[in-house]
Image (tube, grey):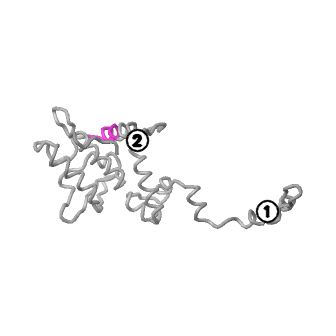
Amino acid sequence: MACDRTTIAGRRDYAVLLLLARLGLRAGEAALLTLDDIDWRAGLLRVKGKCGRIASMPLRQEVGEAISDYILNGRRPSAGRTICHRVETPSTPFRSASTVSLIAGRALKRAGVSGLRSQHTHVFRHTFATIAIRAGASLTEVGQVLRHMEPDTTRIYAKVDLEGLRSLSRPWLGAVLCQILRKPSNNTCPCVAL
């Protein structure tokens, strides 16, 4: 994730990036998380999404450990209930998605990723959806995790991996016939004339 986790900012940034990459959170959702949104015993995270909708989702161990590390080893105790805060004094809470976008943009740059138009944080969401689909999750399941109201919204995130699809599909019979029927004398296929 290209974060120096020996620093306070690095621990915070790592936790933020895991929220985006492993849970598919939007930048605004990650920015506004509070301590009250985490049920440590049940391993659940309450997410306040678009249009004021609230969803509960499993808190993956890796993400929980990163948040815990930041809270215990960096975040100022007097920082209030919001999880993510500026490292500089005064340590004010994140108020919008823009701070999370800056963190994501810097991490992508350090990792050598360039050429993105904007919406650095959505790269993580797209990747989350693509990985889930490749692992066998349906578009409906991915849409539920991403908290989409419309199935068409999820389809946008499902980047088609053409090589991946080719490895799963059977060869087209026409291509096989062309290979078999190819005339050795001039290397032409009689199928073309059809």
- Residue 99 vertical placement versus 130 (above, below): above
The boundaries of the magenta stretch are 95-103
Q: In the rendered structure, find residue 178 and report the number of the disc placed on it.
A: 1
Considering depth in this image, is 114 or 80 the residue closer to the camera? Answer: 114
Which residue bears the numbered disc 2?
A: 120
Q: Is residue 99 covered in magenta?
A: yes
Q: Is residue 159 left or right of residue 188?
A: left
Q: Position of residue 142 (x, y in %)?
A: 42, 61
Q: Amino acid at mark 1?
A: Cys
For residue 9, which quarter of the picture? Answer: top left
Q: Position of residue 179 (x, y in %)?
A: 77, 63
Q: Of label 1 and label 2, which has the lower sequence position?
A: 2
Q: Are the residues at dot 1 and dot 2 in contact (C-beta closer than 8 Å)?
A: no
Q: Secondary structure at mark 1?
A: helix
Q: Amino acid at mark 2?
A: His
Residue plotted at (41% across, 57% down): 148
The residue carrying pointer 2 sits among few (fewer than 14), some (14 to 19) or many (20 or more) residues within 10 Å by Cα, namely some
Considering depth in this image, is 33 or 107 the residue closer to the camera? Answer: 107
The residue carrying pointer 1 sits among few (fewer than 14), some (14 to 19) or many (20 or more) residues within 10 Å by Cα, namely some
Quadrant occupied by the N terminus: top left
Q: Position of residue 51 (x, y in %)?
A: 34, 52
Q: In the rendered structure, find residue 80 and report the number of the disc placed on it.
A: none
- Residue 118 vertical placement versus 164 (above, below): above
